[in-house]
Image: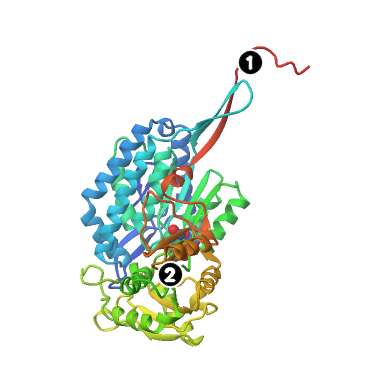
Amino acid sequence: MNSYQMYIGGEFTSGATTKMMDVYNPATGEVFAQVPEATRQDTQSAIAAAREAFDKGDWRHSTGIQRATVLFKIAAALRENATRLAELETLNMGKPLTESEYDLADAATCFEYFGGWATKIFGEVNPVPDNAISMTMKEPVGVCGLIIPWNYPLLMAAWKLAPALAAGCTMILKPAEATPVTVLELAKILDKIEELPKGVVNIVTGYGEVAGAELSENYSVDKVAFTGSTEVGRLIMKAAADTNLKKVTLELGGKSPNIFFADSDFEAAVEGALFGCFVNQGEVCSAGSRILVQKPIYEKFVEAMIAKTKMIKVGPGMNRDNKLGALVTTEHLERVSGYISKGKAEGADLVYGGERLGGDLANGYFVSPAIFAGVNNQMTIAKEEIFGPVASVIPFEDEAEAVAIANDSPFGLAGAVWTRDIFRAFRVVKAVRAGILWVNHMQPTYCEAPWGGYKQSGTGRELGRYGIENFLESKQVHINLNEGPMGWY
Ligand code: NAP
Ligand code: MG
């Protein structure tokens, strides 16, 4: 069994107490690795290492080229080790191997993309009306706490580490307790990069209530970048407000509408509905879990969804035939199953799936993808984020009703609209209050384009130029060009 250590101040360590926690393979229910359980004190050591590296080290004064070199080296090492890391991601998280391979490639691309930004951070000259030069200079925000979820373990780490490094920050990364393995493998990669000073990147494993809470409460942390649930996002913002008002960016949950008009390309639409909702076992923040279908095609659409879902193979992610793997933990399986029961109890019509899989799969956390028809937007399964393969199919009459249902949610992360009418597509894009809108597609994500939510889906944006701005402060500098006293008295 693999046993891992944390990475603090450029050293691998098991922490002060050497207490270890088990990491499970969700496809078998077996323990496959152990990682240290960080205490508050361990987290404080990591924060102190990052603080010292920021305040006394050279990293924040390094050139863009120096930081870009580090980022490109990380990307190259990820690509070299992609096969092994993708396997570990699947063993730890449960997703199909092909998806882990995509994630690895995306993570490497993310480091390359922000490697490009490292040399393109510059301020501006402000056109003030006096005889003066007013400039805005950009500086790294400081020590950053990076807290990430379990659904894309290495990719979510890349989304935060890459821009923070490009900006010249120092950081402490806390992976989710269920999925620390690939992030700790990344620590080994970082350790070999000579140009990366000790203490710039620190990695602590352990519980959110301990390590995560310390990062959000600690006065030496200048910023927290968080991806996870709305519930925990609220705690982090509160902790920041109650302590040092550290900067906070939040990427939170969603209940995204995927809207299908009667004129859409039917085959593409059905595939888009299923992919949008079931990819990555539905453990996707932008999952199109509310499938809104216009009444003239509703019946036919639900039938086609059922027929196609029957073809989707569920099983261990290591087997390339499987399109859906195991859910991440046994607790999460129970949570998802609880929503399925609630859907039935509230009168939605479970027309397919939603069962825990037995036989060979009985020890793993497998559930068959579930389709609920006849859902109305007030039911729990349409209101709350399930974060599993559960589709709620909701009928609608016309465009106005589709938009009203789409917007009737506390969330606003993403949405999609399917139609051949470009005028309607743009009307819906403008009317839906969400941070990402797809037309005739769902889920493509690029590090070149901003990602984040309206309403309770978060605050701030990651990726694109917003991604780098998140880790920068703006300093206004005024240079007086008048000689002599200004004549105040
Ligand atoms: P979560 O329970 O909120 O956990 C996210 C991270 O926060 C984990 O590292 C967790 O540690 C930590 N944490 C837990 N309690 C904490 C506390 N009191 N203080 C500080 N940190 C704490 O979410 P999850 O179950 O891992 O992930 C699912 C959620 O993430 C969904 O709601 C999904 O929509 C959201 N998500 C959003 C995006 C996006 O871009 N908007 C992307 C992916 C996922 P532990 O693991 O130890 O509990
Ligand atoms: Mg937890």
Q: Nearer the viewer, residue 478 or 440?
A: 440
The mark that comes first in sequence, 2 or 1, is: 2
Q: Secondary structure at mark 1?
A: loop
Q: Secondary structure at mark 2?
A: strand
Whether residue 433 is visible: no
Q: Nearer the viewer, residue 451 or 42?
A: 451
Counting from the top left corner in percent of width and height, residue 168 is at 43, 37
Counting from the top left corner in percent of width and height, residue 379 is at 52, 80
Q: CA distance from mark 2 to mark 1?
A: 60 Å
Q: What residue do we see at 52% from left, 58% from top? A: 458
User: Where the N terminus falls, by quadrant?
Assistant: bottom left
Image disc number at residue 87: none
Residue tagged by mark 2? Answer: 258
When asked about the image quadrant of residue 371, the answer is bottom left
Above-or-below relation of 27 to 376: above
Above-or-below relation of 463 to 126: below
The amino acid at mark 2 is: Asn
Residue tagged by mark 1? Answer: 482
Above-or-below relation of 267 to 202: below
Q: How many other residues sit within 10 Å of disc 2, few (<14), some (14-19) or many (≥20)? A: many
